[in-house]
Image: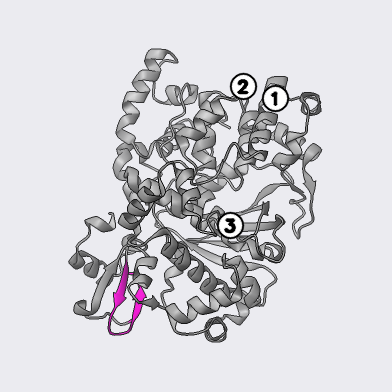
Amino acid sequence: MQFAHLTAQACYQAMKSHDTRFDGRFFVGVSSTGVYCRPICRVRLPQQKNCTFHPSAAAAEAAGFRPCLKCRPELAPGFAATEASAKLARSAARMIEDGVANDVDLAQVARRVGVTDRHLRRIFADEFGVSPVQYAQTHRLLLAKRLLTDTALPVTDVAYASGFTSVRRMNTLFAERYGFSPTRLRKEGRDEETTASAALTFMLPYRPPYDWPRLLAFLAMRAVPGVESVDGEVYRRIVRVAPAHPLASDSAPTTGWLEVSHLPRRDALQLRFSAALAKASQRVLSRTKQVFDVAADPAEIVSALGPLSDGAPGLRLPGAFDGFELAMRAVLGQQVTVKAARTLATRFVDAFGEAVTSPFAALTRAFPQPSRVAVLTRDDIGRLGIVGARADAMIAIARAMNEDQLTLAGGADPAKTIAALCAIKGIGPWTAHYIAMRALAWPDAWPPQDVALLNAMNLPNTVKGQRQADAIAEAWRPWRSYAVLHTWRRLEKPVAGTENESKT
């Protein structure tokens, strides 16, 4: 259900029925109030003649509307695009949302997604109805609005955490776009009970259904002691994140904790993270959304996968908070069980990770950074029981990332990333596809030579069997990553959310 395929009448009917399937698909500008809303907004229904419909919040603001304070457009879930040009535009948007493009260097963003800046402007306008610069400005404003409403951060910190170069710039845009100052918004919209906490709390809405037990079990099985933990229905971990803007008072990476829990009655996840990460809120929010795949549209995926998704229509693709960490763990998991890979990862973290303090006894260490691993030797890693070939591959990945020759984050081109990984000795196609699937949140990965996949598909582990599997998987594009998860699910033990231990 892309915006281009929706008529004004269809949009109005979706708004009239408060249909959650359309939340985030479009925004409604109301000329009689000058406000734009989500289609699920519960304010009095405006007359259709007063409504215009826009593909993004940025497009609505470019048309002169200000955000509704009731339904809060900044809380709308995103969605994954399927067409090639839309994918590129969405990749660029993810870079903006992750703070990578805070200086709006369009040429740099275009290079990262593999197109010219002129082509990027065109496909971006087709997808979002605005330019990348306008999109970035709206994203910063809405994040600032969210931080002013939901946190006790000083206004200066809110400006930098949202990606602005100065408080003056934020104040100017607030006045131009919304007609009021940030301080006024804080006085009128702030929830004292929420902002009194030392931790920051945010809601991350999703489109139901959401298979929280299965995703939580996936993460729990792979949780590295000290770095992450699952306690009951809550996931926690240590993260290291840089602030959204290099002009922040402290631009060095910050280490802190976060936790994610499920609020099924609200169709949302709850994210809490330490105040130490406040200035990096933009990236913490962006990466958490990716890890827990809140932008997915289950109906669209189920439609493509058909019977394969029976029994788990809300299955999500587990992402990665840190691409380097995921790559290290993928290499450690080559040709061993999940349990064995977890043991090796624990030794690796204990030997080279950074000791941290947190309010949780289970969280004591941060995963090693690329700069730390890049200076290690094969013998340094080999002492942990890690074979030499894998140690060499881990060091090579660390050096490539430390020298900015390899990017393992959302927005990177999957094909180029896989090719770069496969050029590293010790990294095969399966490992490269697995890293792309999770670190890049690539929805169309199809790891080759996967014995578990072939077994679940009742195909022989031969060249002919692989060709048969590839032919079958063509029908699942562009959601083959979800097809992989559903196929692995067939080999589960009889415990909800548990996956075959042949996968890292």
Q: Residue at x 35, y 77 (%)?
A: 65
Q: Label 3, on which residue?
A: 283
Q: Is residue 29 magenta?
A: yes
Q: Residue at x 44, y 45 (%)?
A: 315
Q: Secondary structure at mark 2?
A: loop
In the displayed structure, would residue 248 be above or below residue 383?
A: below
Q: CA distance from mark 1 to mark 2?
A: 8 Å
Q: Are marks 1 and 2 in contact (CB under 8 Å)?
A: yes
In the displayed structure, would residue 465 be above or below residue 6?
A: above
Q: Label 1, on which residue?
A: 392
Whether residue 152 is visible here, answered yes or no, is no
The amino acid type found where label 2 is placed reads Lys
Pick whichever of labels 1 and 2 is earlier in the sequence.
1
Locate residue 47, reporting x and y percent.
22, 80
Q: Label 2, on which residue?
A: 425
Left or right of 168 in this view: 33:
left
Q: Quadrant of the N terminus?
A: bottom left
In the displayed structure, would residue 50 be above or below residue 159?
A: below
Report the front residue among 141 and 186. Answer: 141
Pick whichever of labels 3 and 1 is earlier in the sequence.
3
